Image (cartoon, rainbow, N blue to C red):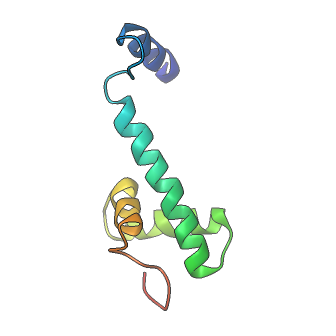
Amino acid sequence: MAVTTLLDGQAQAPPGAAADGLDEVMGQRAEVFQAQGMVSVQLRVTLSDALARLRAHAYAEDRALGEVARDVVARRLSFGSGQS
């Protein structure tokens, strides 16, 4: 159902443009991937462990994963040197 909704929205978008909201979702997803890589390097852990740490931090702080990822990418939040 979700895929159908996205495809319908994309079909109605002007040529070369993304469906409403899709750019934002894709940008947020890219930030999560970037943050995942940064946390992986900071903690010297696997990518899946880094994503788990990001999710745990978001849950513990009652924040959206995308917000936490944005802070990591902007270097406002670091998981290295005992910080999380």
Say which of 57 and 6 sits in front.
6
Residue farthest bottom in this picture: 81
Q: Is residue 45 above or below residue 59?
A: below
Q: Which quadrant of the view contains residue 15?
A: top left
Pick the residue in front: 24 or 55: 24
* Picture residue at 32% right of the left edge, 30% below the top: 21
Q: Which residue, as the protein is rendered here, is positioned at the far front?
A: 16
Nearer to the camera, 84 or 60:
84
Query: How far across and down, in percent of the image, does residue 19 sit?
Result: 37, 21
Q: Residue furthest right?
A: 46
Query: What quarter of the picture does the C terminus occupy?
Result: bottom left
Image vertical order of residue 29 relative to residue 11, above or below: below
Tell me the quarter of the picture where residue 36 sits.
bottom right
Give the answer, above or below, for where 62 lies relative to 19.
Answer: below
Residue under the point 33% across and 58% down: 67
Q: Residue 64, position in %: x, y?
A: 34, 56
Residue occupying the point 49% across, 18% down: 1
Q: Give the total number of marks visible in the rendering.
A: 0
Q: Quadrant of residue 14?
A: top left
Q: Give how far across and how far down residue 68 sits, in percent.
A: 37, 63
| Left or right: where 22 falls relative to 51 | left
Q: Position of residue 51 (x, y in %)?
A: 56, 62
Residue sitting at x 63%, y 68%: 49
Along the line of sight, the residue nearer the viewer: 2 or 23: 23
